[in-house]
């Protein structure tokens, strides 16, 4: 009986002790997307990515315009074909068809490479910015004694009714507004 009371007392102390410790943990939240997009580096990276994208788009547009011109020429030759020049025009059309097929494959390859280049450049530009922001989040969270900091920007947290918003403190740490 004495051991039973002692066991219940120890369990109660442990239960209330963990409740007390849990109550002491601070929870905060941030808007990671807002922090990232407010940095000067983000704006610079976006501009660089936009320039690269425009360059790739112009290159592809030029290729596509040439493709359309050749296709229009082929259609025109087909419409103007007569019995007298049928053999010669058919040979030209076959050659043009092969050229068009080669051009189409080339356009698809250039599109694929452009997408890869854009993805690599995006990662190259934004990865250091994300690391800098994550480091600032860690520093501010530790300085202010937070056990948990949740990111509310992506919508994966359906409800948050408490905790402190650390977004402004992290922006201050990064030197942005």
Image (cartoon, helix red, strand yellow):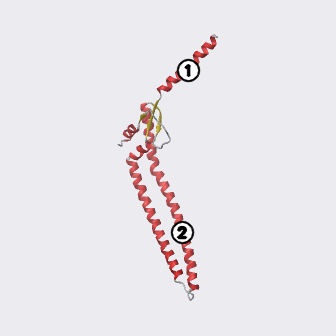
Secondary structure beneath label 2: helix
Residue at 58% x, 82% y is 91
Residue 111, above or below 66: above
Check the image and name the residue furthest to the bottom.
84
Residue at label 2? 104
Instruction: Answer with the quarter of the image where residue 100 lies.
Output: bottom right
Relative to residue 88, is residue 125 drawn left or right? left
Indicate which disc residue 14 carries.
1
Cα gap from disc 1 to disc 2, whole angstroms: 72 Å
Relative to residue 111, is residue 5 drawn left or right? right
- Which is nearer the N-term, disc 1 or disc 2? 1
Q: Position of residue 79 (x, y in %)?
A: 52, 81
Secondary structure beneath label 1: helix
Indicate which disc residue 146 carries.
none
Quarter placement of the C terminus:
top left
Q: Give whichever of 117, 115 is nearer the camera.
A: 115
Badge 2: how crowded within 10 Å, few (<14), some, or many (20+)?
Answer: some
Badge 1: how crowded within 10 Å, few (<14), some, or many (20+)?
Answer: few
Check the image and name the residue furthest to the top.
2
Q: Position of residue 159 (x, y in %)?
A: 48, 37
Residue at 57% x, 85% y is 86
Residue at 45% x, 63% y is 57
Q: Position of residue 130 (x, y in %)?
A: 45, 45
Residue 91, above or below 25: below
User: Badges 1 and 2: C-beta atoms under 8 Å apart?
Assistant: no
Residue at 43% x, 46% y is 129
């Amino acid at each position: 009986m004495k051991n039973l009371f002692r066991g219940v007392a120890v369990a109660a102390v442990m239960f209330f002790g963990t409740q007390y410790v849990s109550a002491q943990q601070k929870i905060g939240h941030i808007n990671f997307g807002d922090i990232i997009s407010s940095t000067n580096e983000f704006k610079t990276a976006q501009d660089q990515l936009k320039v690269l994208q425009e360059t790739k788009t112009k290159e592809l547009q030029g290729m596509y315009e040439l493709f359309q011109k050749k296709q229009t020429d082929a259609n025109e030759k087909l419409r103007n074909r007569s019995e007298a020049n049928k053999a010669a025009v058919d040979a030209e059309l076959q050659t043009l068809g092969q050229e068009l097929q080669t051009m189409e494959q080339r356009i698809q390859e250039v599109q694929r490479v452009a997408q890869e280049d854009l993805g690599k450049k995006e990662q190259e530009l934004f990865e250091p910015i994300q690391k800098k922001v994550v480091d600032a989040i860690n520093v501010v969270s530790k300085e202010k004694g937070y056990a948990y900091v949740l990111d509310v920007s992506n919508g994966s947290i359906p409800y948050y009714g408490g905790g402190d918003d650390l977004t402004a403190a992290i922006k201050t740490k990064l030197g942005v507004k």
